[in-house]
Image: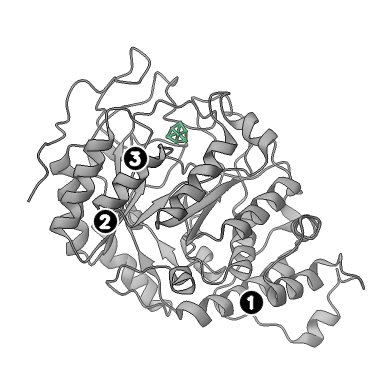
């Protein structure tokens, strides 16, 4: 049964937006807190990695003769061993490891990360269907292509029937998790989101419903949860307060963002967080703080992706984040939190044509095909060059599965709940 209302793709789409914004553009692009891009102010490329798919396990003797090795704990090679043994590093150690990374070190890290992932999840890759329900947002994050002050952004909102049709299409392709993502759009009130969640749960009781709809008061999160939402994705973007202030307007608070994440956990959600790699002004120390924060949060899922500039933002001339650094951090995250689900994100695939498979080879185990109707996809324009077609699209899920299976992965039709949940039970 459908909810008691239907979100028409109505013409009042400008609620919460600055005047003059077009509504319902004919396209859509990615969702909300995700624009991820990265590549900072970090020591660039010499440090990147070439991720070769399967096992590149080096023998201990090889490591002993590694060219960058030095005989103390500040040695990046020894730090990866410490990370594997302790599943934690100090901020100083993270900084040393990130700054000291090399292609050889990255290859060894990826082999360790794959082994850690396979021990928990085997060679299973979980698919989630992404529905980008609105490109309207009341916020003004400086890096985001659909920020409210971008008057050239194409705005749209999906009606409930359209959203349910996306889920139906995804279900037919074997997807059993639907991720409803969008800007913080006041038109999507608490009641509308509750009705949307209820409708999906009623039609697809064997599926998980994930929301990625930004910051809400406790009561709203509780209402979504009571309606049947299983998971909530909310990237912290950067754990450093000053860096957060450089990327967001003063109206947005890093403390509130973090408080939301812990609130979601208390409400029993499976929580996802993450950050951009290479966002303007980012340093290795900032990334170290991101990793330390995630260790403390211990989320069910972590999504990271390179910062990618958008032509209509103040960061238009900033360099995009590095795919290699993003991959290296995926490997670090896998070793730090082996039970966490880690997607190879659209942003990663947008800056590296092999990003999807390289992400899996670095320790990721989730992909998110895009269920958003084609007429909206280009309007969900979080960053330039966002991959929204080809194997990113639901229309090619069968091809995507074949590619994964040929690479030795299993792709079940399953909700794919996080092993972190089991650990907490
Ligand atoms: S402007 Fe809106 S959609 Fe863009 S990142 Fe910020 S909260 Fe998310």
Q: Residue at x 57, y 80 (%)?
A: 115
Comparing 375 with 354, the one in front is 375
Confirm or deny contact between disc 2 and disc 1 (CB under 8 A).
no
Residue 381 in percent (x, y) is at 40, 35
Comparing 340 with 77, the one in front is 340
Write down the quadrant of residue 382 in the picture: top left
Comparing 329 with 267, the one in front is 267
Write down the quadrant of residue 397 in the picture: bottom left
The residue tagged 3 is 220
Residue 130 in percent (x, y) is at 32, 51
Disc on the earlier residue, 3 or 2: 3
The residue tagged 2 is 394
The residue tagged 1 is 112
Judge from the rendering whether residue 88 lies leftward or rightward of residue 258; answer left or right: right
Q: Residue at x 40, y 18 (%)?
A: 151
On the question of residue 30 being in view, the answer is: no
Vertical side of 12 occupied by 417: above or below:
below
Residue 142 in percent (x, y) is at 54, 28
Vertical side of 149 occupied by 156: above or below:
below
């Amino acid at each position: 049964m459908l909810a008691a209302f239907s979100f028409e793709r109505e013409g009042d789409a400008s609620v919460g937006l600055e005047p003059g914004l077009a509504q319902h553009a004919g396209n859509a692009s990615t969702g909300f807190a995700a624009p991820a891009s990265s590549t900072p102010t970090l020591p660039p490329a010499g440090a990147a990695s070439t991720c070769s798919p399967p096992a590149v396990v080096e023998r201990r003797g090889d490591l002993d003769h590694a060219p960058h090795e030095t005989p103390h704990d500040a040695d990046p090679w020894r730090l990866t061993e410490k990370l594997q043994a302790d599943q934690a590093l100090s901020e100083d150690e993270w900084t040393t490891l990130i700054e000291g990374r090399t292609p050889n070190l990255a290859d060894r890290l990826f082999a360790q990360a794959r082994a850690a992932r396979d021990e928990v999840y085997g060679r299973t890759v979980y698919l989630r269907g992404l529905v980008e329900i609105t490109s309207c947002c009341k916020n003004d994050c400086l890096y985001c292509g659909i920020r409210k002050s971008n008057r050239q952004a194409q705005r749209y909102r999906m009606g409930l029937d359209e959203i349910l049709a996306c889920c139906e299409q995804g279900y037919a392709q074997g997807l059993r998790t639907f991720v409803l993502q969008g800007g913080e759009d006041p038109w999507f009130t608490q009641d509308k989101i509750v009705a949307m969640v209820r409708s999906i749960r009623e039609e697809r009781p064997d599926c998980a419903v994930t929301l990625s709809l930004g910051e809400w008061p406790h009561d709203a999160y509780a209402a979504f949860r009571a309606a049947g939402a299983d998971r909530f994705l909310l990237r912290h973007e950067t754990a450093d307060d000053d860096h957060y202030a450089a990327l967001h307007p003063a109206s947005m608070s890093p403390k509130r963002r973090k408080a939301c994440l812990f609130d979601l956990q208390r409400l029993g959600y499976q929580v996802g967080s993450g950050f951009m790699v290479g966002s303007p002004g980012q340093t290795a120390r900032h990334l170290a703080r991101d990793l330390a924060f995630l260790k403390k949060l211990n989320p069910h899922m972590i999504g990271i992706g390179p910062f990618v500039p958008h032509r209509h933002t103040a960061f238009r001339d900033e360099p995009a984040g590095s795919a290699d650094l993003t991959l290296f951090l995926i490997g670090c995250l896998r070793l730090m939190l082996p039970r966490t689900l880690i997607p190879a994100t659209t942003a990663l695939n947008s800056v590296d044509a092999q990003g999807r498979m390289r992400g899996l080879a670095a320790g990721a185990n989730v992909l998110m095909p895009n269920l958003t109707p084609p007429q909206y996809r280009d309007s969900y324009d979080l960053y330039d060059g966002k991959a929204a077609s080809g194997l990113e699209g639901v229309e090619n899920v069968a091809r995507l599965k074949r590619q994964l299976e040929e690479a030795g992965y299993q792709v079940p039709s399953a909700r794919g709940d996080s092993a972190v949940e089991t650990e907490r039970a």
